[in-house]
Image (cartoon, rainbow, N blue to C red):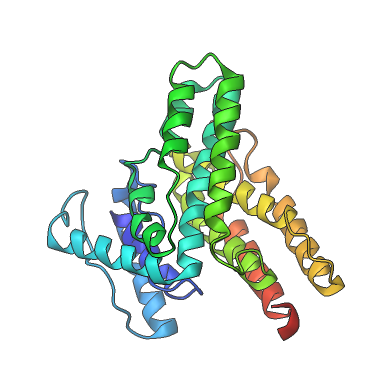
Amino acid sequence: MLKRTRLWHSMSVCTIAGASLLSGCQSSDDAASDTSAQNQQAAAETASGPTAAPPTASGEGEAEGEGEGRMAVDLEDHLRINDAAYLGQLDLISGHLLVGMKLFEQGSLEAARTHMKHPGDELYSQLEAAFSSRNLPGFSPELEALANAMAGGEDVAAARQAYADLQQAMREHESAVNDARAPAMLLQRVTQLLRTAADEYAIGIVAGKVDNVHEYQDAWGFTDHARSLLQSSDHSDAEVQQAIQRALTLLNGLRPLWPGLIPPPQVSGDASELYGAAARIEFIASGLSDGNA
C-alpha cells in the first residue's frame, strides 16, 4: 500500500499522471518506505501543484477501507480513458512475466511463481474496464495457460509456448492504441518503466546489500522489457533511429546493476543510475521534432 501511494504521487510529475501502476508489486517489506512516500508527495506537489491523491497509510492494511476502494475505482477509470496509463499497466505485467519466465528457465521455480500474473491478480483485474471500453477480450485464458504450464515445473517447452502465446495476445491488446509504438509514446513508456524500476531497485538494494530479492528482480524485469520495446522500434527516420540508439545505449549501461537474477549478498548498484537514465531518455524524447513525435 505504501509503495503504491508513493508511486501515485511520483507519477503525477510524469506524463502518465495520477496512475498508480505498481499496485500489483507490493511485498511485506513495503512498510519501510513510509518516509519515502511522504517525500515523494511533497516533491510532486512542489513540481505540479496539489493533485487528487489517494489516502496515505502509515502501516500495512491501515487504509484498506473506503480510501483503498476509491483509489482502485479512480485507477480503473484512468486506465479506461488514458492510453498511456493503459499501455503502462500492460508494460508492468510484461515486466513481471519476463522475469518470472527467466527464473523458471533457470530452474528457480518458487521465485518464478512469485512474479507470474494470474487473471485474478490486481494488475490484470484493474484493466478489465479498459479492455471493455476498447472492445477487447482480455488475455485471461493465456495467463491461466501459462500458470498451468509452469505449475509442474518440468516441461520448459510447454511453458515457453504458453509464454509466446501470451505475448502475442498482449501485443494484440497493445495494438488497440494506434500510436502505441510511435517514437514519443515508446520513449514515454520506457521512461516510466525505468522510474518504476528505480523505485523497486531502491527497495531491493539498500546501502549495497540485498534487502528484497523480489523487488530487485522486478527492477530487472521492467528494465529489460523497456529494452525490448526499444529494440522493437522499426522507424526508418534517421532522427528517430538516433534517439532510439541513444536510449538503448543508456539501458545497456545499466546491466551491471544486476550481477544475476539471484543476487549475491552484496550488490554495488544504486537506484540513482536508473533514475538518471530515465531523466536522460525523457530529455531525448523532448528533442524529437514534431513530425517524429
Q: Is residue 142 above or below residue 271?
A: above
Q: Which residue is drawn at the image coordinates 83% and 74% (left, top)? A: 239
Viewport quadrant of the N terminus: bottom left
Q: Position of residue 6 (x, y in %)?
A: 36, 62
For residue 226, what is the image quadrant?
bottom right
Name the image quarter holding residue 77: bottom left
Q: Residue furthest left?
A: 65
Q: Is residue 81 left or right of residue 88?
A: left
For image coordinates 58% across by 51% down, the residue present is 171
Is residue 253 among what the camera can see? no
- Residue at the image position 35 percent from the left and 75 percent from the top: 42
Lateral position of residue 156 relative to residue 2, left or right: right
Horizontal and vertical percent position of residue 254: 68, 51
Q: Looking at the picture, how far across and down is residue 93, in whole percent?
A: 48, 47
Residue 236 location (% of width, % of height): 84, 67
Q: Is residue 124 visible?
A: yes
Residue 28, located in which quarter of the rendered image?
Answer: top left
Furthest toward the right, the residue is: 238
Look at 26% across and 68% down and name the residue there.
54
The front one of 110 and 28 is: 110
- Residue 97 vertical placement versus 7 (above, below): above
